[in-house]
Amino acid sequence: MSYLDQWKQKKNAKRQKFYTNHFHQTMESVPDSPLSTNLSENLDTISHQLGSTDDLVVRTLPLPERGTSAAVLHLNGMVEKEAISEFIVKYLTTTINESEQPAIHELEMSRTLRQVIRSILSGNTILLVDGKAEAYVASTPGWERRGVEEPRVESVVRGPRDGFTETLSVNTALVRFRLRDPNLRVRHLLIGERTQTGVNVLYLDGVVDPEILNEVMRRLQAIRIDGVLESGYLEQFIEDNHWSPFPQLQNTERPDKVAANLLEGKVAILVEGTPFALIAPAVFAQFYQSPEDYYERFYISVFIRLIRLISMFISLLLPSLYIAFSSFHPEMIPSRLVIAMTAGRSTVPFPSIVEALIMEVAIEILREASVRLPGPIGPTIGIVGALVVGEAAVTAGLVSPVMVIIVSLTTIGSFASPSYSTAISLRMLRFPMMLMAGIFGLYGIMLFLILILIHLAALKSFGVPYMSPISPIKIRDMRDLFVRLPLVKMRNRPSIYDPSDKTRIEGGQRP
Amino acid sequence: MNKGFRPSGNAYSTWQLTTIITSTLIGVGVLTLPRSASIALGEAGWISTIAGGLISMGSCWLMARLSRLFPGRSLVEYSPLVLGSSSLKWLGKVISFPLVLCYLAYLYIIAAFASRLFGEVVVTAVLMETPLEATIIAMFLLAAVLCQHDPQVVARINELLFPLIILPLLLLAVASFQKAEWNNLLPIFTFSWKDLFNGVMETTFSFEGYEVMFIFFAFAQGGAGKGTASVAGLGIAMLVYTLIVIAGIAVFDIDELQLLMWPTLELVKTTQVPGLILERLESAFLAVWVVAVFTTIGNVYYAFIYGLRQLLGKGIVFQRISSVLLLIPLFWLALQPQNLLELSRFNSIIGYAGAVFFGFYPIFYLFLSLLRGRKLHRQAGEQDD
């Protein structure tokens, strides 16, 4: 055995030890022992395992007709009380015939303590009967949940209005409702030692590349964490490069987007407790593609997509170009404009890089503040910030009028992006870009662009190169790159995800 | 995370090989090309770029042919095989070591001088108040960043930047045809064979750089056409060069052209953007030209570092560290020429040396390996096992 293997073994042993030491109070610590036949003994062990928590409701029912007694257990607030009183308690107290089962939709039998504890914690109701070493588990989860609403951050003009909610089963159903394919498969995982969060991995069998699917599952199963409160936790564990500014998984709260991506041969990850689903693998095109592109007709969607591309470049480059032009290459600006600009800048005491930095930071503060503020006040802050402060700053001679235009165009441009997290990565890169423009002018901008491109060329998401299909070049996949061809012409699934089933539209269709 | 998942290997496609060749060639030389091409041949200067391109194409094709004998191996790896024998393996290593070292030193030197020339242009034309050293260091750091990655990234970045290199030059050529005085191109056939030879030698500096393919051909995919790539890559570069030279001669005439320091940049000054969005274009052109220079310096430096890594039998960690450390002597080397005049003298010496040397290298190796024929194949096969 080589030293490397020894070292790896040692490291694994160490990790295992750490793991057992630190998570000893979690679900794994609950003994996997069978239940006893004695009711009060069972109640004692369960209550002991839950630390006699006060929200555990235990109702013992003497059943003199059957000559035994039973107990109903559940956690307060996690269950549908009507269902319990209607079906279980009524069943126990009125039914004499033992072969008749309570009229509950899902009823299972549990024989071990761990299963029982897990069921209670998931909002199920446990029915224990004296003299039986098994427990009935009735599925009665009924905590307060939000209904299906319109997505908050990803709105479209044309397209379905429903968005994911915090409930995993509802979210899965929203996708299933769109894809009634028997090949739509759901794999359920529990991640998080303490939160025991349900995670559903969705894919279309026979379309997805099994290699990518296996890699997604492998990475998900390797996660060791105490809690998963949002899909972002998982994203940060399974992404290829933690240090990249670019998101390597797409997130969305739109079920139609998930369905469309599943059809392209990708894998979706839905997480309990969050309306944001993850889609893997992701490529650079996510920065400007929106589900709406496929709902509108050809010319409209091409136009809108080109507008989004332009706004992407504006949000990344505009302030830096202003800095470079005004301080290094004034000869490039038309002479009349340069006179007007200089007149506007004549009162400004700072160099243009400082001016731009001040304004850009100010606008980021405004943006963050208006996100945090409650609904009705948010727009007010926007108006006060943009109009009043901007106007006053120009009048006071702190910034030039052109700068205000530049900053507002940049911000508006970044909001034209179809997804918030992609937009924010470009907004971040704007700042080093401005610094480079302040040092080297246009030369600095080009250097930084090349640097970003080197990074993008090296970046991969689940084995798919991030810049594909531009590099490595795939002419066939370019039908959906900058210009989306009419749907009839997009006959094949994108080959970059290596789908098992390649065609999606039958050829030769004519009205 | 698991970096080993789906390693795309280092397989280059035919198109990627083509873009590497073209973008390595097109670099600093474009700015002076119309002048240097027409020094010897006068009005028929564009013939020298075609002749130079055809000769380089032949040389590059020989490299491809050579690489086909040793698939998956670079010059550094097959050189000892060609020169040694199965019984005297050390002999091959000993003989090939100085030859390979010469090759690597050549790459190192052209990287240094290309960056120096680049720095001079940037400092004189756009960033008058920035020190020369700063512009050169920034470019070097970018090349070092490229060296932190796998060879596949080199292919992808060339593929990504390729349109950004070719399109502005083509646009420039076509746009300046509007102001062309076509009579300037006449008479065509007034030169002797000696003039043609001199003219070709003058353009060698613009065509140097395809030598990196001694290294990069090793990464070609199983089905990738190395010969096709060399013909296409050099063909595209030749086409662009010829158009630029024709534009240069046709817009200025031959006498004026000899007086211009950076004729291509002057060509840019004569063109106008419709609608006057931008009043003058030199800075914008130079900004795009940075990309062309980066692909030259980056590819050459990467080939150098990768060759060194193979020569010494080291891994990616060595590549990463040495790529940063070797920037210091590279920087020193770049600052050696005292002025532009000396730099251009150095450049033409290197250009001549390269032309002689690397016209000769592929022929030499190909001749030897064909001579040794079957024996060599057996030897190569043994090493694979």
Image: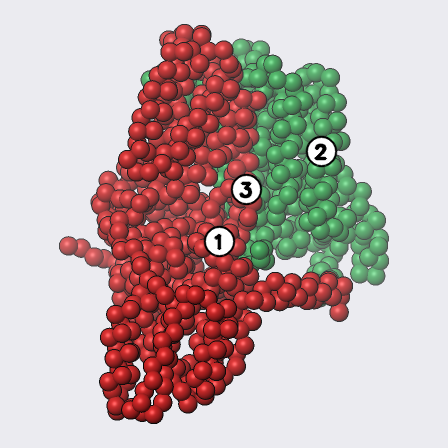
* Chain for disc number 2: B
Badge 1 amino acid: Tyr
Q: Is residue B243 visible?
A: no
Q: Which residue is mark 3?
A: A455
How busy is the neighbourhood of tag 2: few (under 14 within 10 Å), some, or many (20 plus)? some
Quadrant of the image occupied by residue A243: top right
Residue drawn at (43%, 15%), measured in percent from left and top?
A399
Q: Position of residue A323 (x, y in %)?
A: 48, 20
Q: Is residue A347 left or right of residue A99?
A: right
Q: Residue at x 34, y 51 (%)?
A: A253
Please give the residue where the numbered disc 1 appears in the rendered image.
A233
User: Disc 1 is attached to a residue of which chain?
Assistant: A
Name the mark nearer the viewer: 3 or 2. 3
Same subunit, tags 3 and 2 = no
Chain to which mark 3 belongs: A
Q: Colour of chain A?
A: red
Mark 3, mark 1: which one is toward the viewer? 1
Residue under the point 73% across and 44% down? B308
Q: Which residue is mark 2?
A: B327
Tell me the colour chain B is drawn in. green
